[in-house]
Image: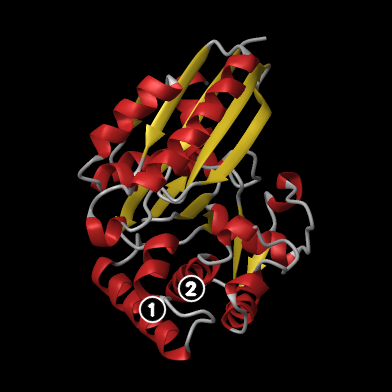
Amino acid sequence: MERFATVDVGSNSVLLLVAERKEGGFRYLVDKAVVTRLGEGLYRNRKIKPEAMERTVGALKRFRGIIEGCRVKGMAAVGTMALREAENAEEFLERAKKEAGLTIEVIPAEEEARLSYLGAISGLPLFRKRVFVVDIGGGSTEFVLGEGSRILERSSLKVGALTLTETFLRSDPVQAEEFSDLSGYLKEAFDRAGLPAGGGDLVGLGGNIATMAAVKLLLTDFDPSRVHGASLELSDVKKQIDLYLSRTIEERKKIPGLDPMRADTILAGAAILHTVMERLRRDSVTVSTHGLRHGLLLERFG
């Protein structure tokens, strides 16, 4: 059977997908995410920090070992917000190629949104309906309105869980005034940008949304098969915001289902999702553990 690999280098995490072609689609062999914070401090300094570069290149080297062990026929790697914005992105790309053997293509926001949409709807019973996908990343949030595999509208907003955490949530535990400032900023940002018009099922993806579903399900070990297709109600999101506001980062790490590496950014991610749901007047969101890496697989090797 032919095997293929895709890599997504994001602002907050890097993700690897290895799949084997089978009749009618793919069987996923490896689906791995590592939080490396490539975009750490980027909002202020416009450069990738040396330690963030080291963490991410190190993760990519480990990914390369997995890919070689799987003996894939084809491979594709893409970079998003952090690599679009960083002044020293070329240095990182050269190191990734030299040290990890990965040629990373930096894709525009519109392409990121499109591939994320195609990945998000894969494996969900929504394919023939109109769907509104929100992808909350570390450095940006992507919005796509589509019907089946056809994209109707798309947009991108430079608000992400990592950048908002660094900008607004500097105390531990977070102070009420800080969260109020964050909420006000989000409302203004969405007022300026607007959202694609039209109805459809709301689907959410990204590490923070998946983590919120795992917290709701009280998963001691993350199980993609249980999280993919799970539902988060608006009331669930509000309860989790209140929970994270009442905890220090160390206390959040002890919450069942919460990935300790996302303990500091989960509150900002939840705030973005809450704002989106309120703006769209949606009471629930369907969670997808699929994303850009799955869309890239379908696009390049499907």
Q: Given the image, on which type of amino acid does mark 1 rest?
A: Leu
The picture places residue 217, in percent across and down from the top left corner, at: 76, 63
What residue sits right under mark 1 in the picture?
A: 182
Vertical side of 247 occupied by 56: above or below: above
Q: Residue at x 23, y 41 (%)?
A: 88
Tell which residue pokes out farthest to the bottom in this image.
177
Q: Position of residue 156 (x, y in %)?
A: 32, 54
Residue 244: quadrant of the picture: bottom right
Disc 2, SS: helix
Q: Quadrant of residue 261?
A: bottom right
Give the number of the disc on residue 218. none
- Please report the residue visible at 58 percent of the width from the left and 42 percent of the height from the top: 33
Image location of residue 216, percent across then percent down: 72, 67
Q: Is 22 left or right of 291, judged from the image as shown? A: right
**Residue at the image point whose x is 35% and y is 42% from the top:** 80
| Nearer to us in this view, 98 or 26 | 98
Residue wearing tag 2: 271
Measured as percent of width and height from the top left, residue 236 is found at: 65, 74
Q: Residue furthest left?
A: 87
Query: Which colour assignment does the render follow?
Result: secondary structure
Residue 149 visible, this orientation: no
- Amino acid beneath label 2: Ala
User: How much space separates mark 2 and mark 1, taking CA atoms?
Assistant: 8 Å
Q: Nearer the viewer, residue 64 or 225?
A: 64
- Asked if the residue under mark 1 is in contact with the one under mark 2, i.e. CB atoms within 8 Å, the reply is yes
Q: How many marks?
A: 2
Asked if residue 176 lies left or right of residue 65, the reply is: left
Name the secondary structure under disc 1: helix
- 130 w.r.t. 202: above or below: above
